[in-house]
Image (cartoon, rainbow, N blue to C red):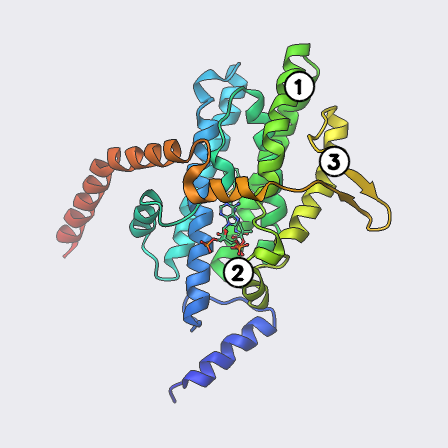
């Protein structure tokens, strides 16, 4: 007996209701497919573009040990991008088309990667704050309703935890160093704090996708909930490190049992997301060039695969 549309819809709703996973062969409403492709592609693009700000420091890392650590981290990000593109492919998206949309400016990537990395302290602060925010946002996504995405997120989160620790350890070392090194850490913290809070997306009241994504259990918490969790988690870390977070309104609210914090400059967020951040043009130009430079590899791989097919036929 063939399943009718209402049966399929009911099955989908039940899977979500029972907290089970949606798998690639399951029927899904078109809007669910579109949402998952959008979110997974944006995430994959963020990992790949996210290699640039830190990659910028690989040749200038101050020791062989720091260079090896940074290389490993940036390589992990390439890996995350690749398995996220694979997860998007299980929904019928084509990786080549997703890349084409990224370099044509038709698909987004995280706002955070449009800021420059001015000193080596930025590498530590990215690990601490940016990877810290990423973990906060992504741990709940390990329970996302789409199976391949949720499973990819488990490994990604484990690696992000290592990234966060390496950043914090680097900053601890710098804070035990010279006055100039401490000044660099404080300066990097000042520049990355507010953009890190923006990573969680617009306030709930302005978030176009949250309600539907929560109903489908794609997202498990709202943008504001996760942002608050990140602030609460990070303030004690800043104290232990000995840096000041650049927000005069940051204080413990005993009644709410959370830290209160100042207003985020949402006009800056909008500017960056719409392509006008400090490094948007540079990031996309670099990605486009890397893609074009890699054309011969894709051609060679396709020619090799065709030869193998011919031989086995
Ligand atoms: N930047 O309705 P909303 C990483 C867009 S990788 C740019 O709240 P949603 C790492 C949003 O896409 C970090 N755009 O959306 C890598 C939507 O636009 P469209 C990436 C943003 O999806 C290397 C519109 O604003 N992490 O951590 O419900 C090294 C309205 O927003 C941003 C992920 O991708 C932003 N910050 O919630 C180190 C995690 N925020 O598509 C670290 C997975 C929002 O309607 N994604 N927008 O044109 C998510 O959890 C969610 O997609 C978001 C946004 C919380 C980001």
Residue lying at the far bottom in this picture: please name it.
Answer: 1
Return the residue at label 1.
173
Please tell me whether residue 223 is drawn above or below residue 134 in the rendered image.
Answer: below
Q: Is mark 2 within 8 Å of ligand 1?
A: yes
Q: Residue 81 carries which label?
A: none
Q: Residues within 10 Å of mark 3 (few under 14, many from 20)?
A: some
The CA span between labels 3 and 2 is 29 Å
Vertical relation: 216 (above or below) 181:
below
Upstream in the sequence, badge 1 or badge 3?
A: 1
* Between marks 3 and 2 in the image, the one whose residue lies nearer the viewer: 2
Q: Which mark is residue 209?
A: 2
| Residues packed near mark 2 inside 10 Å, few (<14), some (14 to 19) or many (20 plus) | few
Residue denoted by label 3:
235
Label 1, secondary structure: give it.
Answer: helix
- Placement of the C terminus among the 4 image quadrants: bottom left
**Rendering coords of residue 87 (x, y %):** 42, 55
> Residue 86's spot in the image, x, y percent?
39, 52
Disc 3, SS: helix
In depth, the one of 213 and 78 nearer the eye is 213
| Location of residue 269 in the rendering, given as x and y in whole percent from the top left corner | 53, 42
């Amino acid at each position: 007996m063939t399943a009718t549309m209402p049966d399929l819809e009911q099955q989908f709703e039940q899977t979500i209701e029972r907290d089970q996973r949606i798998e690639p062969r399951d029927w899904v409403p078109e809007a669910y497919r579109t949402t998952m492709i959008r979110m997974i592609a944006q995430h994959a693009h963020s990992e790949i573009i996210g290699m640039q700000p830190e990659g910028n420091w690989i040749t200038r890392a101050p020791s062989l040990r720091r260079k090896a650590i940074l290389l490993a981290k940036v390589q992990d990000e390439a890996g995350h991008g690749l398995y996220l593109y694979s997860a998007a492919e299980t929904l019928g998206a084509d990786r080549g088309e997703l890349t084409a949309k990224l370099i044509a400016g038709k698909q987004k990537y995280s706002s955070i990667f449009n800021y420059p990395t001015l000193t080596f302290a930025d590498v530590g602060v990215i690990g601490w704050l940016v990877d810290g925010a990423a973990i906060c946002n992504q741990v709940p996504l390990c329970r996302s309703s789409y199976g391949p995405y949720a499973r990819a997120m488990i490994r990604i989160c484990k690696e992000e935890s290592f990234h966060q620790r390496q950043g914090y350890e680097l900053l601890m070392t710098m804070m035990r160093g010279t006055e100039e090194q401490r000044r660099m850490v404080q300066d990097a913290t000042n520049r990355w704090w507010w953009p890190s809070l923006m990573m969680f997306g617009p306030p709930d009241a302005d978030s176009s996708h949250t309600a539907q994504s929560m109903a489908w259990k794609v997202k498990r918490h709202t943008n504001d909930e996760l942002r608050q969790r990140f602030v609460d988690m990070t303030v004690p870390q800043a104290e232990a490190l000995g840096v000041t977070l650049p927000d005069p309104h940051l204080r413990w609210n005993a009644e709410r049992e959370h830290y209160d914090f100042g207003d985020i400059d949402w006009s800056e967020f909008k500017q960056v997301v719409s392509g006008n951040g400090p490094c948007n043009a540079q990031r996309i130009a670099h990605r486009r060039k890397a893609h074009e430079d890699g054309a011969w590899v894709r051609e060679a791989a396709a020619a090799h695969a065709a030869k193998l097919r011919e031989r086995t036929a």
